[in-house]
Structures are given as C-alpha cells and as structure tokens.
Image (cartoon, rainbow, N blue to C red):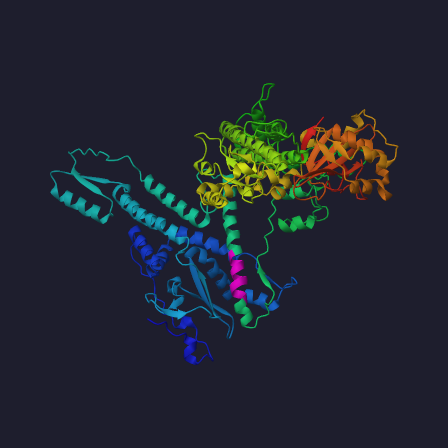
Amino acid sequence: MSKKKHPAARTGGTQRTPIIGSVIIKPPVRRVYDVGDWRAALRAADNGRVKQLYDLYDDAMIDGVLSDAVQKRIDAVTNSELTFQTAEGEEVPEITALMETTAWETLLSEIARVRIYGRAAVEFGFTPEFSVTPIPPKHINLDRKVILREDSDDDGFPYEGDGFLLVLGHRRDFGLLLKAVPYAIYKRGGFGDWSQWLELFGMPRRVGKYNTYDPESRRLLEEAFEKAGSAPYVIIPKEAEVDTQESSSGNGASYDEFRKANNEEILITILGQTMTTVQGDKGARSLGEVHKEVEEGKNRSDLRFVERVLNQKVLPILEARGYPVSGGRFIFPQAVEQLSVSDVVQLSSVLDIPQSYLHDKYAIPAPQDGEPLARSMTASPFGLPATDDGDSEIRNSDRTFLQRLKDFFVKAPHGGATAGSPRMLMNDGATMEDRLISGVAAGELQVFSPELFNHISGDLISAVRPAFRRNTANADTSYAYGLRDDAFVTALEMNLFHFSAGKTLAEIQALNGAFRESSSYTDFEKRAREICGTFNRTWQRTEYETAVLTAESASNYHRLMAKKKLFPFWKYVTAGDDRVRKEHRALDGVILGCDDPLWKKIYPPNGWKCRCRVAPLMRHEAAGVDPGEMRRRVSEYFGTAEWKAASAQGWDTNRSETAQVFTKDQQYIRKFPGKAAKSLLQLYPQDYGLESLNKMIAASVTPRPVYAGAADSWYDAHQILEDYMGRKVSLRRKVFNFHTTGAHSYRVPYLDCVTEALKDPDEVWLNNYSKGTGEFTNLNFIKFYDDSAVNVVCEIKEGRVYEVKTWFEICTGPRGGSRSKASRLKDPRWKYRRGLLIKKS
C-alpha cells in the first residue's frame, strides 16, 4: 500500500491543510481488562500495531493514583520556570510572550508525556495565532514514520520533513505506563473482589424469631426484612436455637494490603518512590525527605529532556516561521533552594540578612513604634553580639552555634520522645553511644558531634597510614622502593575527613529523625542503638576494610609507576579464593600495558571489600600476549551487571590517581561542597569545647620566636618543611618572595614561626579558607604564643602537591569599622578556626 499524500500536496503546496483535521479520532475501547489483555496488547505493539495498547493505557488512566502520579511528573515541568536567552544572555520579548500562552503549556506537557507513553506528537499552527494540537499516541506509527488517518490503518501521512509537526519517541519504547498498567488492572480486580467480600461477610446478619403457633407472623417478618435492605437475615421459631460458626477469622485486611502494594508499585514505577504521594505507616519525616530527593532527581531528568527537545527540535521550527531565535537557547534555570527557618538562623551568623526580607518571607508585620514584641531581644537578632568591647566576643561566642540555634526557638516545646520519660543519666562508664543518645534527647546534638567525627575519622585514618609505611599482604611484595608520597597520603586523609564529616552529619540527622518519630524515650533508645550499631559497627567495618584495601592498592600503584621502564606491563590478579566475585575472576590474568587507559577504569579496588591487586611484569614476561583478547575480556566485564552496579556507586575510577578512598558518589552527603559544607562552616571552637582566640593566647606561655636574619638565607635552608606527622611540605620560591618582599616584608620576622607551627601546632583546622566556598582543601596550622597567634595555611592540589600557601599573625580584634556586625567568615578571630578540627594539643 502506498502512503497517503500529505494534505498540503492537494493544495499545490501554496497552503497547508492541517493533518489533525484529516485524522479521525475515535474514543478508546472501554471494557473490563485483565492482565491477559495487557500481554496481548504488548505482543501486538511489538509487531507495530499499538492501538490496543494505547486504548488500554487510556482506560487504566481512570485509576486515581496512576493519573495523579503521571500528572505530578508533567506538573514538575510545566510549573518550572523556563526562559529563552540569546547568545548575549538577553531575553526576547516575542518569545517570552509566546511562552505565556496556553498553547506553549500544551507543548511542554506533550513533550514531558513522552516518558510516560513512549511517544508523542503535536502539530503547530501559526495563523492567525500560535497553536499546538496534540496527536493521540495510537495514531503515531514510528515504524513507517507516518501519522495514521484512523487508528487501525497501516499507513498514513508522512511526518518526516514536515516543519509543522513534532514527533517524539523510539520504536519498542512504550513508556512507563507499560510497567504500571498491570498493577492498575490488578488493583481494579482486587477492589471488585473486596466489594464482593464485604457484601457477603462485611454486613451484619439479622435474626428474626416468630411464634410457631402463628404462621402469619412469619410471613410478616419475611416481608419486613425484604423491605429493610439487602443485609442477610435468618428467620427461625422462637423456640429454636441457631449456632453460627465462623468459617474464617479474616477481616478483609488482605485486600487492603493488596491495594496498597499495587499503589506502591505504580508510584515507584512513575515517581521512583512512594512517600511524596502517600504517607508511610510511621510517617517517617526523614525517610520522606529521602523519597522527595528521589522524585526531584527524576524531575531534573525530565527538565533536561524537555530542554534538549526544545533546543534541538522546536527551535528550528520556530526559526523557519520567522521567530527571532537564531543563536538562542531555552533554559530551565536551576531552582533556588527554599530556606527554612533553621536555614535562616544558620545563615544569619555569616550573612547580613535584612529584617524586611524576613517580614515579607514569613508574612509577619513589622512592629509599630512602642508596640510590645512577642519576645525580648537583649542581643542583636539570631544571637550575635550587640557590642564588641575588648573580650566581649568571648562571652557571646562561648555559646556554641547549636546553643544559639536553640535560643532562637526558645519558646518552642521540645516534645517528642522525652514526653513523660526520664533522660538517660550519664556516668563515668558511659559509652560514646550513650552520650550520643542522651545528647540528641536533650536537644544538644542537632547537627554535628565532634566526638563521633573523631571516632569515625580516627578509625579510617588508622586504616590508611600503615599502607605507606610498610609492604602489605595485598600489595605486591616482590619489590619495594620505599616511595613515600606525602602529598598523596595527606590528600587521602583529607578525603577521609570529608567522608567522616558527611557520615557524622548523616548519623546525627538519623538519630534526630528517630527521636521525632518515637513515642517514648524507651522507643527512641531502642531505635537509636540500632542506628548507632548500623553506622558505627556494620557500615564502619566495611568502610574500614575498603580504606585498608584502597590504601594498599594505592601504595602499590605508586611503586609500580616509579618503575614503569623496568615493568612496562601490569597483570590483574585476584585473591584466588572462593570469596572472589565471578566477574572479577574473569579479569584474573588480564595483562595490559602500564599506560593503557583501561587501568583508569579497572585498577583495583573495583567494589566494596575488593581484594584484587596488580602485579608488575617485565617486557619478556608479557611476550606473546594478545592485546586484543585482553581488551575483549575487559569489554565483557564492562557489560556485566556487577560493573554497572559498581560504576553507579563510583567504582569506575582509579583512586590511586584521584587520591580518594571514597568518591563523591559514596559520600553520605553526596554534594559535600553544598549540603555538608553549609553545616560544617558553622562549627567553631566552642563546638569542640575550645576557648576563644584571646583566651587561648592569654593562656599560652610560649614565647614567639622572631627571625632577624636575611630572608634568602632562611629560604635556602627551608625550601622543604615538615609538618607534625613528619611529612614534607614544599614552599615555592614564588610564594616565599611574595610574602617576604615589598608591602609584605613584615612577615619575615615570622619565618621561624612557620617551622614551629607546622612541626608542633596547637590546632589544625580543615576548611575552605582560600575561596570561602567549595571543598575543604586548606589546612590551617595554628600556634598560640604568649602575645599572639600565628596561622600557617597549607593546601593540597590534586593529590600531588602539598605546599605552604600563606602565613600571618591572626588579628585579635574584628576587622573593619563595623565592629558589631562583623561576619564570622570575615572576622579573623573566627575565620581560620572553623570547619573540621583534626588536631588539637
């Protein structure tokens, strides 16, 4: 059969007749469907006949849960802000007006619907005004690339090259509804069975008794029951006895569980989770937040898809119609995270937030002159010091960030698991777990625990350090060159500090979530011990072993790289026992050149607790090896489910090059620079039980050394320095000259302080001093003297360079003229002593 001519062809090409006017749209077939119908429809769709399947979809969309879940995916697109910008970043008023039309919303909805139905098509109209008309999916034949006149036709109007049609989809992709519809069918049948069960067993049974000697009373009783409704009834003589035995003790709950199970499967298929639509049995708020993140991830994927379709498919159509879109792009701007009240409290300690913003945001009217306030404000808003005379910052700053946060909610009841239950009493034998549970219950641990952080990081650090001091069983021991890359080891440790901080935040968050959900202290304590056991024993054991194996493998890698000329080939070797994964066993014996890029993917470890290693080979030992066969084996490994799962978890990188034990995908809080750093930036000395800067100086009895010689003479003897771990720290000539000449020559007398602060610091802080945002890559070595405090800032670059960045005496007063509002990120008394405290004297 030849394809029908395009309607425009019948007009000689001078005027285009819309295709949609020639399409005969019939209502879907409405009948009782079962799963057998779904399978039959799928088989027909596989053969190119999709009418039956899409009729089934339309009928299934009557299900409220399914239709609501689909609409949530679509609403996430249509409710998101969309802009069109030229190459110069300017908006085009004509396109902005176009995007304000209902037709444009229809276009966005249909594009988003592709993920749900597997295909979508619209026809554009531009006269007399912009219009978008959807074409039903069952009229789209992706095999023949035509729009069907009738849904049962085999041929239709070709759409390729038609500048008025947008057709999206892929053959054999029938959308998410293909997976969700069976559960809607199951649920519909389950509701019917439940209704029948209720009719038979859910209604109360009526018993009527009549006088044996009065037959007329029996007739009247039957008549009355018939008119009184459909509930079952029994009529017996007064003298008779009826013994009713239950055939089952069931109450119909299984039907409800079946309904919920189907709803959950539908929601997981469409939204990826359940708790943003239906509340869990326990109403777990923290779990709901995780589910919300899953849904938002799918929404971001939808937005990226829609954005690409608009730029790749729709822009050419608009440009052909004369719209000024050349060189421009449609963009979904990244949504700004909404601030909660607690977020505002935290930010107020580092940002100057106008009161007018808070009044507008929370719809709180500004107080009139003399009007009584809801609470007294003895200090500046959010607990910051109102004055700053002498050591006044000590009196206010001694109160930790957590205490200041608590002050803001001073009128709010604590409630939760403490209601009616005594708190745990601490004694000398209390464990860290006891202190964590008690601290959370008392509201003292809401964000971070220094003790827990030290426990986690100390355990993991102890797993890494030995690998670089000795040969290990897992490293290749046939040779040893004593290589010790101090920059790499320090970078590994910084990665573990990041990981430990994120895990600490996650565990404290989980404990606080359990507290909010618990009905009593006993209930909370039980939950809390399970959480602590999972975090601090089960997971910590796996993480410790992974850290050991990663460090050993990295140490081996550095030795191998140092002898590439002697050993130009490497061989993949497994542990050789029955615990080896079968996928890793397939790699056993793979030989590749030491510079082969495949090592960036498969250099062990390749998963949690992976014990594989790499052995060096001389050139003659690799003679006769078929490189193509070796790469084929690796390629087969890349096709396994094990590799795909490992890759998704961040095991597709060579950690020996990236100086990472745990990648960002394995962090408890994945976006460390964002979510974790936001909280960790609020940690100051008082949160670790330390005194303020001025008090630390006052308590010191160490005299500050003053260097009086020539700067160059000092540098000649100190180009390489040592830190408190005995690790080498470089001081580049460029950095040294900048700090010792011209306007910065005043730092020359502090040169001997540099060596002392590195070798014997009183405190070492890990933070983001250099940029103020992003990763914590700066180490602040602080030394307290009897008249001052000196800070030496070092930086790790890409796990290869460990160097001094700057040194200076810390100012003991606020910088700038505004003494009462000095931001802690700018105030030198706070700026350097914040973040993660990794050493204290």
- Residue closer to the observer: 71 or 765: 765
Where does the image place residue 247, in percent across and percent down from the top left? 23, 35
Apparent side of residue 548 relative to residue 762 in the rendered image (left or right): left
Where does the image place residue 618, in percent across and percent down from the top left? 56, 36
Q: Do we see residue 692 in this rendering?
A: no
Magenta stretch, residue numbers: 305-315
What type of secondary structure mainly makes up the magenta span? helix
Residue 710 found in image quarter: top right
Q: Do we see residue 315 in this rendering?
A: yes
Apparent side of residue 559 relative to residue 219 in the rendered image (left or right): right
The answer to whether residue 671 is above or below residue 97 is: above
- Residue closer to the observer: 149 or 451: 149
Where does the image place residue 153, in percent across and percent down from the top left? 33, 67
Q: Residue at x 43, y 39 (%)?
A: 281
Apparent side of residue 279 relative to residue 367 in the rendered image (left or right): left
Where does the image place residue 193, in percent across and percent down from the top left? 28, 46
- Residue closer to the observer: 547 or 689: 547
- Residue closer to the observer: 459 or 226: 459
Q: Residue at x 49, y 56 (%)?
A: 75
